[in-house]
Image: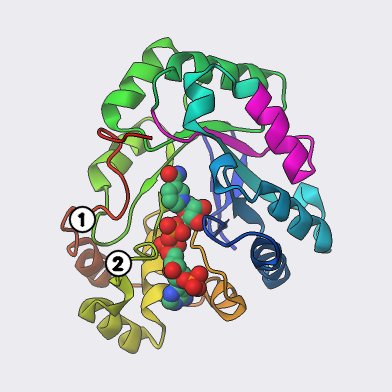
Amino acid sequence: MNNIILNNGVEVPQVGLGVFLTGEGSGTVNAVKWALDAGYRHIDTAAVYGNEAEVGIGIAASSVPRSEIFITGKVWNDDIRNGRVREAFERTLEYLGTDYLDMYLLHWPAEGTRQAWEALEDLYFEEKVRAIGVSNFQIHHLKDLMNYGHVIPALNQVESHPLMTNQELISWCRKYDIATGAWSPLGGPRVPLLEHPVLIELGEKYGKTPAHIVLRWDIQRNVIVIPKSSHKERIEANLDVFDFQLSNHDMQRIQSLDMGLRVGPDPDNFDF
Ligand SMILES: NC(=O)c1ccc[n+]([C@@H]2O[C@H](COP(=O)([O-])OP(=O)(O)OC[C@H]3O[C@@H](n4cnc5c(N)ncnc54)[C@H](OP(=O)(O)O)[C@@H]3O)[C@@H](O)[C@H]2O)c1
């Protein structure tokens, strides 16, 4: 497993398991347990996914110590808007069955971001979270935050996949030493990205699946990537990306599939 070093020195395993829509009950518990058994050491969750308790059960059911697992949590928009970051954080810890988070993110740039960011900074200074960051922030949201913030976000987690690379934002973040996490890296549950002829062709060339090609592209462009699956075989397979290398030419070919196609909401125009 590769690690990415954040701007405060904390290390994040570059591939993590995303648990949005891994399901209630045993669905999420099993996904987390299978992932940890397979060698994942990074779980990406959020209060709004409604399955933090199941993530906690999955972690407790594995033989991997908490200290070896990087857990990312996110403050939901209602809590940002209503100034309830600390309460949200305490609830998340309780559900997960832990007494700290490795990364805590503002989920969307909702109204109330300034106050919420200051609350995150407090948690960080109190050493209750090892790193803090944001999600779905555009350049203008980040510029604004960096005007009043005391801590530069360690991470911006945004939509990014071959059909919407979000490269301009990623490159801007890199200039300020803000790492990027890619959500919906495989195109999410609705867009058939993995059936793209170029990804199929590259899969055949490297003896890998289209999913491997996309995840490897993320690894080589130094992006943290959090594919979701509810299936044991796919969870295991998605980690099998460290034994080959895409050529520069093929990296460019994947990059050139970008057509600005969002599979999720637009951070400049969301209504939740
Ligand atoms: N910060 C944010 O606002 C935000 C927004 C969206 C997502 N996220 C995070 O990012 C994570 C990943 O994004 P996502 O869940 O939207 O989409 P994704 O990981 O791009 O794609 C998940 C879809 O791909 C399928 N899949 C997984 N591995 C596969 C493989 N090897 N071959 C073929 N199909 C495969 C899954 O099906 P099965 O499950 O049936 O295998 C599921 O339908 C989320 O779980 C969440 O943690 C964050």
Verify whether residue 108 appears in magenta: yes
Quick one: 167 or 100, which is closer to the camera?
100
Between the C-alphas of marks 1 and 2, the distance is: 10 Å
Quarter where residue 92 is shown: top right
Q: Residue at x 54, y 16 (%)?
A: 83
Q: Can residue 242 be seen in this view?
A: no
Q: Report if the CB atoms under discs 1 and 2 are less than 8 Å apart.
A: yes
Q: Cβ of disc 1 within 8 Å of ligand 1?
A: no
Q: Where is ligand 1, by quadrant? A: bottom left
Mark number displayed over residue 191: 2
Vertical side of 78 occupied by 157: above or below: below
Q: Position of residue 148 (x, y in %)?
A: 42, 10
Q: Is 199 rendered above or below residue 43?
A: below
Q: Which residue is drawn at the image coordinates 40% and 26% (left, top)?
A: 110
Density class for disc 2 (Cα within 10 Å; few <14, some 14-19, many ≥20) is: some
Q: Which amino acid does label 1 sit on?
A: Leu
Secondary structure, mark 1, is loop
Name the quarter where the N terminus is drawn: bottom right
